């Protein structure tokens, strides 16, 4: 099996530092290119016209700088292709989610949702998640040969966020299809056909959530959706449309990212048998393992900002108005920050939690604690229940440069061990 750890050898084979999401090798393993970019061209101009920064310090600084924006072309200088304009016009009647809003609008809405997304609520989900994972593993034990993504990595976060929000039972495959078309809108290389699919998916999801909201108003419970409705009805400025944007973001972000943590994380461990053994035998690392897996192969590879003022990045002057992608996956492996072992998986790494896989600054991931809890439970229980787990065929990738992850991941679970 190809080891991603042979990073120097792989980087030596590359001739030019580039950031090219159309290159299949880059999608499968971007890390050798990241190394070349960090060393030779840390503020790189991509074929899309934007810049990408790959060093930890630059990524961190751009994400935390208040003179940057996540709103679409706030500086008003970008010439959008026709299909992107069509996408923007299609969502004009819906308020943007907090991910696409700057302060002070962002601060107002984030404060309201943060009040409902409490540590107590997340801790409550620990028990629910453990039961869900164990039941699922019982069912999968009978099949033995499974697709880790479809049968496990996707199901866990989907069911958890569904239950946390208190949504009615849904057709999981339909809803996943809609949300997959939507997350494609984050990708820089979205095609006109994908724009049409995203407009369709967005409409379907909107209708589903509008109906769910009406149902929840009549049958409130001890869940996140009821809490958000209470905020709205308390007259604190959350309108019905803002509520739908918020639920839609929580719902989609709640599973389309964590599926990659479980998929990429399990792959990293299977590819590093010494680390796999540590996880198998040493429960003392459970509370930190998710951070190292997040650092090593980030489920969200890039974020981005438009600069509202000029900035100095790696000694290079960058002008206001530039769109700067922040390569989170590269920052997480920058030896300037992590030292010489940056490219190695080390589940005992002391400072792994300093990764930027959840971003940084005001948009720092709202679901970080939830995602880590889910990743830890799903991966440790999977491995300890099935210590003989093995890859049966090389996984395929989802062709995404932002939410990069395995799409099909065939494995043989082997003989289960009784954990109780
Ligand atoms: C491993 C899983 C996850 C990863 C890697 C991840 C990553 C991220 C990143 C990088 C950002 C910041 C984007 C930026 O700065 O432009 C973000 C924001 C956000 N995430 Fe996550 N996320 C994960 C799971 C979740 C979950 C489970 C939820 C909710 C249930 C969630 C909800 C959000 C929300 C609401 C924001 C927007 C915060 C804001 O704009 O203030 N995420 N996430």
Image (cartoon, helix red, strand yellow):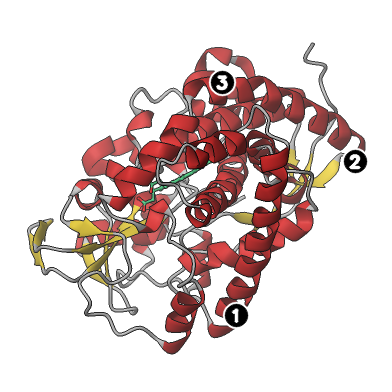
Q: Which residue is mark 3?
A: 123
Residue at the image position 47 percent from the left and 54 percent from the top: 242
Q: Position of residue 345 (x, y in %)?
A: 46, 35
| Mark with earlier residue (3, 2) | 3
Q: CA distance from mark 3 to mark 1?
A: 39 Å
Q: Secondary structure at mark 2?
A: helix
Seen in the image, is 54 located left or right of residue 185?
left
61 or 112: nearer the eye?
112
| Mark with earlier residue (1, 2) | 2
Q: Quadrant of residue 269?
A: top right
Q: Which residue is mark 2?
A: 143
| Residue lying farthest to the right in this orientation | 142
Q: Residues within 10 Å of mark 3 (few under 14, many from 20)?
A: some
159 or 217: nearer the eye?
217
Q: Which residue is mark 1?
A: 196
Single out the mark in the foreground, 3 or 2: 3
* 244 to 324, vertically: above or below: above
Q: Position of residue 15 (x, y in %)?
A: 32, 72
């Amino acid at each position: 099996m190809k080891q991603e750890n042979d990073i120097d050898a792989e980087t030596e084979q590359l001739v030019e530092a580039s950031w090219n999401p159309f290159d299949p090798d880059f999608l499968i393993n971007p890390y050798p290119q990241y190394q070349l970019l960090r060393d030779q061209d840390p503020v790189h101009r991509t074929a899309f016209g934007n810049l990408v920064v790959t060093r930890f310090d630059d990524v961190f600084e751009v994400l935390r700088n208040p003179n940057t924006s996540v709103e679409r072309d706030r500086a008003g200088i970008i010439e959008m292709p026709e299909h992107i304009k069509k996408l923007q016009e299609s969502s004009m009647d819906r308020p943007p989610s907090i991910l696409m809003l700057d302060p002070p609008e962002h601060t107002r809405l984030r404060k309201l949702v943060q009040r409902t997304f409490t540590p107590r609520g997340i801790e409550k989900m620990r028990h629910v998640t453990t039961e869900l994972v164990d039941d699922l593993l019982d069912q999968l034990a009978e099949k033995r040969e499974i697709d880790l993504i479809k049968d496990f990595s996707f199901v866990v976060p989907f069911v958890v966020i569904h239950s946390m929000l208190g949504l009615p039972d849904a057709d999981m495959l339909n809803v996943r299809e809609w949300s997959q078309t939507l997350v494609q809108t984050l990708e820089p290389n979205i095609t006109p056909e994908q724009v049409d699919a995203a407009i369709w998916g967005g409409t379907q999801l909107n209708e589903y959530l509008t109906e769910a909201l009406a149902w929840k108003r009549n049958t409130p419970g001890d869940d996140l959706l009821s809490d958000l409705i209470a905020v709205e009805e308390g007259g604190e400025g959350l309108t019905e449309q803002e509520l739908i944007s918020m639920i839609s973001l929580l719902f989609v972000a709640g599973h389309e990212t964590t599926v990659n943590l479980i998929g990429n994380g399990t792959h990293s461990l299977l590819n590093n048998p010494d680390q796999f053994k540590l996880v198998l035998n040493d429960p003392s690392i459970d509370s930190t393992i998710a951070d190292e897996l997040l650092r090593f192969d980030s489920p969200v590879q890039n974020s981005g900002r438009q600069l509202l003022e000029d900035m100095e990045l790696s000694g290079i002057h960058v002008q206001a108005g530039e769109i700067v992608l922040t390569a989170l996956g590269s920052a997480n492996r920058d030896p300037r920050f992590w030292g010489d072992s940056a490219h190695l998986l080390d589940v005992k790494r002391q400072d792994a939690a300093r990764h930027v896989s959840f971003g940084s600054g005001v948009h720092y991931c709202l679901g970080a604690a939830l995602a880590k809890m889910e990743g830890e439970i799903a991966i440790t229980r999977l491995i300890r229940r099935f210590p003989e787990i093995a890859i049966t065929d090389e996984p395929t990738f989802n062709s995404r440069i932002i939410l990069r992850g395995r799409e099909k991941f065939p494995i043989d679970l082997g003989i289960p061990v009784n954990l109780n």
